[in-house]
Image (cartoon, rainbow, N blue to C red):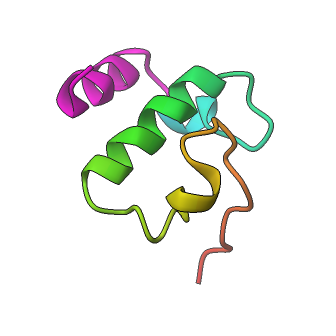
Amino acid sequence: MECSNVLKAALNQGDLPGQLYRGSPKKDLVTDLQRVLVELGFKQELKFDNYEADGDTGRLPLPR
C-alpha cells in the first residue's frame, strides 16, 4: 500500500490519536504507520534495523 493510502485510510477512521495509545489493539495500524515513517526517511529515529515495523508503539517521549 502506498504511503498516502495508508495515511488516508488511518485518518478516515477518525480519532487517530485515540487509536494510537500505548497498548492499543490496533497493531496493524501502528505497523502501517511505522512503514510510512520509514518511507518518509525516519528509519534511524525508529531504530528500524533493530525492530522493523512491529506494531509496538514503544515508549513515547514526554512533551517538552
Q: Position of residue 26 (x, y in %)?
A: 65, 22
Vertically, is 46 above or below 17?
below
* Residue 40 shown left or right of residue 31 in the figure: left
At which x and y percent is residue 48?
Answer: 52, 57
User: On screen, 2 above or below 22?
Assistant: above
| Above or below for 3 versus 43 | above
Closer to the camera in the image, 12 or 5: 5
Where residue 22 sits, quadrant-wise, is top right
Residue at horizontal 34%, vertical 41%? 36
Q: Quadrant of the N terminus?
A: top left
Number of marks drawn: 0
Q: Residue at x 53, y 59 (%)?
A: 49
Q: Residue 58 is drawn in which quadrant?
A: bottom right
Q: Is residue 6 magenta?
A: yes
State which region is magenta.
1-15
Q: Name the residue nearer the viewer: 7 or 46.
A: 46
Residue farthest to the right, as pictured? 23
Quadrant into which the C terminus falls: bottom right
